[in-house]
Amino acid sequence: MYLIPHAEAVLNMMQAKESPGDDDARYVLRGIKHHGRREFTKRDAQQHGKRRFPKADDIDLALDELVRRGYIRLRAAEKAGTGRPPSQSYDVNPLVFRNENTEKRSQYSHNTVEQPEIDSSGNNESASEQSEDENRRQVTI
């Protein structure tokens, strides 16, 4: 009986609905991580997700959510003279990339670019050369 109110509170929290910007914020954050962006403009983000955010104002809720959670930070607006003001620009929190795998990817994200391993043992022969030498030794013996 003592823990029933606590259990009810936990169950209510588990059933809580996400805010409408949460899914969009995750989408924008995935794009930032995928492209390794350390900084970007609102226009860049909207153009990347043009199908999801057809108008520039559609992405505001997602960007506000990322700012609120500390993933990105709005930069101070720079005055560029006459004409239309520049698009809002954002800096990405470096901790966003802290646990990311930093290997380079091809345009098809499931194909990774293989980097040759560096052998620190001082042996400069490749494995294929070593196996060819072993095969020659076995044939001549």
Image: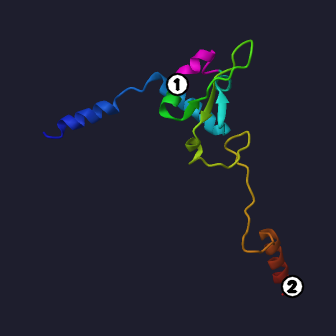
Residue placed most toward the observer, 107 or 3: 3
Quarter occupied by residue 85: top right
74 shown above or below 36: above
Residue 5 coordinates in the image, percent (x, y)? 19, 34
Residue 42 is drawn in which quadrant?
A: top right
- Work out which residue is located at the far top of the displayed protein and give it: 83
Q: Is residue 121 left or right of residue 2?
A: right
- Per the model, the C-alpha gap separating discs 1 and 2 is 73 Å
Residue that numbered label 2 is attached to:
140
Question: What stretch of residues is rendered in magenta?
Answer: 51-64
State yes or no: discs 1 and 2 in contact (Cβ < 8 Å). no
Q: Position of residue 26 (x, y in %)?
A: 53, 32
Q: Which residue is mark 1?
A: 64
Q: Residue at x 58, y 21 (%)?
A: 59
Q: Amino acid at mark 1?
A: Asp
100 relative to 22 in the view: left or right:
right
Position of the N terminus, as image quadrant, is: top left
